[in-house]
Amino acid sequence: MADSPNILLIMADQLMPFLMGAYGHPVVKTPNLDRLVEQGVRFDAAYTACPLCAPARASLMTGTYISHNKVWDNAAPLASDQVTIAHYLSNAGYDTVTSGKLHYTGPDQLHGFRRRLTTDIYPSSFDWLPTAQRKRQDRFIDRRAHANSYCLPNVGVCQWTRYLAYDEETQFRALEYLHAKRIDKYEGKVDPFFLCVSFHCPHDPFNVTQEMWDLYQDREIEIPEYPANMDDTYSAMDRWLNSYHGTDRIDIKDPQSLTALRRSYYGLVTYIDRKVGELVKALERLKLRENTIVIFVSDHGDMLAEKNMVQKRSFYEFSSRVPMIMSFPDGWAAGTQCAQPVSLIDLVPTILQLVGIDQHRPLDGSSLLPCIEGQGTDRVIFSESHTNGIYEPCFMIRKGQYKYIYIRNEASQLFNLDSDPGEWSNLSGHPDYVEIEIGLRDQILATFNPNAIEEELINSLLNRELIKQANKINSVNWDYSPA
């Protein structure tokens, strides 16, 4: 196994590519990610399989859609018989280790990893199950106030937060592990490693230290613009999410508040960039970089007040697009930019091909190596979002310049991202685009069964509600404590 490459997978949370210097933003400083792009491949149309934390991470690790792995929301378990990239690599002789946020729910808190170096930051129980405050066609309806964390006084400077503390612990344990691997190399132990380092930032709350805040002193902070007819552009999905997140009750459009929000986010993006730099420089210093593939991704994006929307869960670009950067130890494909649509579910088959492991079964994702080599010009990707503020099965397909959003029993949306990158002009129903719309809808319905998904999801919600109550009575605790 001496020639097998190490793999360092670095994950951010709620980071969209549009506010990154590495993706061309003129203000946001990401020098370390800029360097990684120069040394590797930047994917310019990468998407999450679901714009929500736990489902996105389950899809990334398994290479499957959420309607196949059944991780519907942030309180849904990933079954222990779901094969992850960590299982594959463990069987191939890799030391599989993770530090930081995984967002696994349920009694299995490893899913193929040999060990975890930290606790998780969110509960492993069913505590975050959508609550039954009211019902709509037997679906749990919930109302939150996430919008509060997107406006003053809840954004801006603070001395410290538990989220920054968590990311510091995540980084310390990861660096400690890399130093241990260098000692192993000196002693002749050459088993390759798969290290996943997963940070909470730049996920809300958007609180930064004074030093992070000062990074963007006197710099231009762009804020969203809101057309007068914005409410008329909303889909049913948008209205549900605005109610769920609280933007229909909390005004987030104050320019001073928006400026503070964006400035704080800029600071957190640079914070994550520094963590990436520390990890890569450690690889170089410890003579491990020469045989390590480095992958940087996020689980999903954040609307960050675009369209007067917050958080994730929607299919708009700010919510569903993610950064994806790969750098190879021999400099292969350095400086390549891939414009074809790709997905987080493509990472598992890509890693398997890179290290020479055969898939034991078909996956929903496909290897990105042809895309890197300039092939795969007809790639199609899908994303799903069915619960946590959403009350019908919802799907997105991206093919070429078109994005189509299908909502069961509700009106659809079709956007030409080349001519309308802000997604303001809905082409659904327009006579000039009927053939395109039908073709994209048919591809969604050939891949997914909305009615079956609805039935499975309702059963899952009802079952988990009952188990949640019993677990509380029995004081069941699945939280992971590292040895």
Image: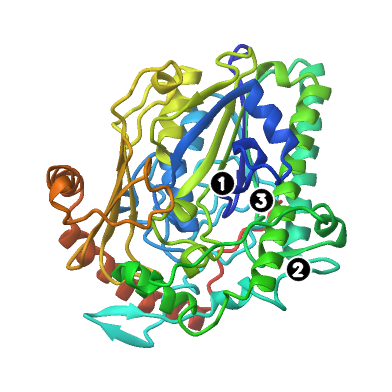
Image quarter for residue 8? top right
Q: Amino acid at mark 1?
A: Phe
Q: Can the viewer see residue 389 in this picture?
A: no
Q: Can the viewer see residue 126 in this picture?
A: yes
Disc 3 or disc 1, which is closer to the eye?
Answer: 1
Disc 3: which residue:
199
Q: Amino acid at mark 2?
A: Gly
Q: Is residue 478 left or right of residue 116?
A: left
Tell me, for residue 375, which label it has, or none. Answer: none
- Quarter of the image containing the N terminus? top right
C-alpha distance separating marks 2 and 3: 20 Å
Helix, strand or loop at label 3? It is loop
Callout 2: few (<14), some (14-19), or many (20+) C-alpha neighbours within 10 Å?
many
- Out of 16 and 427, give the one closest to the viewer: 427
Residue at image coords 80%, 39% = 176
**Which percent across, then down, holds residue 127?**
50, 74
- Out of 291 and 18, give the one closest to the viewer: 18
Residue at image coords 71%, 67% = 260
Q: Amino acid at mark 3?
A: Phe
Tell me, for residue 18, which label it has, or none. Answer: 1
Residue at image coords 51%, 60% = 303
Callout 3: few (<14), some (14-19), or many (20+) C-alpha neighbours within 10 Å?
many
Disc 2 or disc 3, which is closer to the eye?
Answer: 2
**Which percent across, then down, holds residue 111?**
49, 46
Callout 1: few (<14), some (14-19), or many (20+) C-alpha neighbours within 10 Å?
some
Image quarter for residue 129? bottom left
C-alpha distance separating marks 3 and 1: 19 Å
Disc 2: which residue:
156
Helix, strand or loop at label 1? It is helix
